[in-house]
Image (spheres, grey):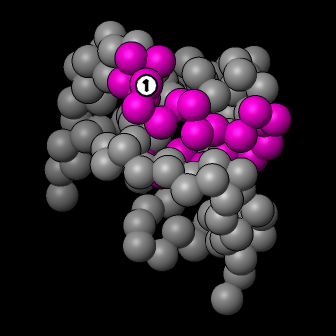
Amino acid sequence: MSDFYSDHAKDLAQSYDSLDFNDVHSTWLDLCPKKPGAALDVGAGSGRDARALSKLGWTVHAVEPATGLRELGRKKSIHTEVNWLNDCLPELNRVRHLNLRFDQFSFPRYGCISPSINVHKR
């Protein structure tokens, strides 16, 4: 089966990366905790947001199920605090196995954040 996001990864990444992180997320950036911690970026795409959060001092776990986008994002994230995971909603099994507490949880496509979330093994 063809995966649209992987098949078009290069064009999608270029499109996502053409938008500035601060402009895209200006409505909620002031809600981020002032002290960086662990962030979970679900649907990380090209990694634009994950890289930006990493530059702000966050340790980011970037979840992207599309292999093409995840691999491009991983290449662009060398020398950053971004850990890439092949996982997907609704289960987030690999994330759950990390058994971590995240200080920021974001679904970039929907613009939702939660200031704190615990993701544990079942």
Provide residue 58's location: percent of width, then percent of height. Answer: 74, 33
Whether the magenta-drawn stretch holds residue 28 is answered as yes
Disc tally is 1
**Quadrant in the picture for residue 50:** top right
**Quadrant in the picture for residue 52:** top right
Relative to residue 52, is residue 55 drawn left or right?
A: right
Provide residue 117's location: percent of width, then percent of height. Answer: 65, 65
The answer, for residue 122, to whether it is visible in the render is: yes
Provide residue 92's location: percent of width, then percent of height. Answer: 53, 68
Rendered residue at 22%/35% (across/down): 7
Element at label 1: loop
Task: Name, please, the residue furthest toward the bottom.
Answer: 122
Provide residue 28's location: percent of width, then percent of height. Answer: 47, 36
Relative to 27, residue 108 above or below: below
**Quadrant in the picture for residue 120:** bottom right
CA neighbours of label 1 inside 10 A, class few (<14), some (14 to 19), many (20+) = few
Relative to residue 6, is residue 27 drawn left or right?
A: right
**Camera-nearest residue between 60 and 35:** 35
Rendered residue at 67%/70% (across/down): 119
Relative to 60, residue 98 above or below: below
Three-letter code for the amino acid on which mark 1 is drawn? Ser
Quadrant including the N terminus: bottom left
- Magenta segment boundaries in residue numbering: 22-43
Rendered residue at 67%/88% (across/down): 122
The answer, for residue 86, to whether it is visible in the render is: no
Whether the magenta-drawn stretch holds residue 118 is answered as no
Determine which residue is flagged by label 1.
26
